[in-house]
Image (spheres, rainbow, N blue to C red):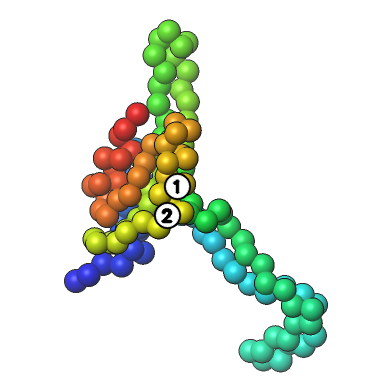
């Protein structure tokens, strides 16, 4: 059975939750129309002065994001800090876009941990990097 990216994403979310290796959220994006309601008949809505709007995160943003808590060395007073974590979910053979690659580079350069994962095991391994 070929798993979809959605299936793999759910497996990753469950595994990370079970391991408690990070706190991860799904990055939702959407597109809709807004304007003035002109009519609402059964399953049909008519909007005047309609305009499209997009909601969500920047192009290339990873599928899953959150943080991983790490403890700083004693020289740094032993405080815990949250390190931004991200997972781009791909099915086997799936490839990242240029925008995704650019975003991943930006996040890593800022100190984030993460990358592309095709399985829960691979995702957990990416989150162990510091």
Q: Residue at x 55, y 53 (%)?
A: 58
Up-down relation of residue 8 to residue 114 (above or below): below
Up-down relation of residue 111 to residue 91 (above or below): above
Q: CA–CA distance between discs 2 and 1? A: 6 Å
**Seen from this angle, which residue lies furthest bottom?**
41
Mark 1 neighbour density, 10 Å: few (under 14) some (14–19) many (20 or more): some
Image quarter for residue 111?
Answer: top left
x%, y% of residue 46? Answer: 73, 86
Q: Residue at x 33, y 38 (%)?
A: 127
Q: Residue at x 38, y 36 (%)?
A: 113
Which residue has dot 2 on it?
98
Mark 2 neighbour density, 10 Å: few (under 14) some (14–19) many (20 or more): few
Q: Residue at x 33, y 63 (%)?
A: 5
| Horizontal relation, residue 118 to residue 40: left or right | left
**Element marked by disc 2:** helix
Q: Which mark is residue 102?
A: 1
| Horizontal relation, residue 44 to residue 3: left or right | right
| Horizontal relation, residue 130 to residue 55: left or right | left
Up-down relation of residue 73 to residue 57 (above or below): above
x%, y% of residue 98? Answer: 42, 54
């Amino acid at each position: 059975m070929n798993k979809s990216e959605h299936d793999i994403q759910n497996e990753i979310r469950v595994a990370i939750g079970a391991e408690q290796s990070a706190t991860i959220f799904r990055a939702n994006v959407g597109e809709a129309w807004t304007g003035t309601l002109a009519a609402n008949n059964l399953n049909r809505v008519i909007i005047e002065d309609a305009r499209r709007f997009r909601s969500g995160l920047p192009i290339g943003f990873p599928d899953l994001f959150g943080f991983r808590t790490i403890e700083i060395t004693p020289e740094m007073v032993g405080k815990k800090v949250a390190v931004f974590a991200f997972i781009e979910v791909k099915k086997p053979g799936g490839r990242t876009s240029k925008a995704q690659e650019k975003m991943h580079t930006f996040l890593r350069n800022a100190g984030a941990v993460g990358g592309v994962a095709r399985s829960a095991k691979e995702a957990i391994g990416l989150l162990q990097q510091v």
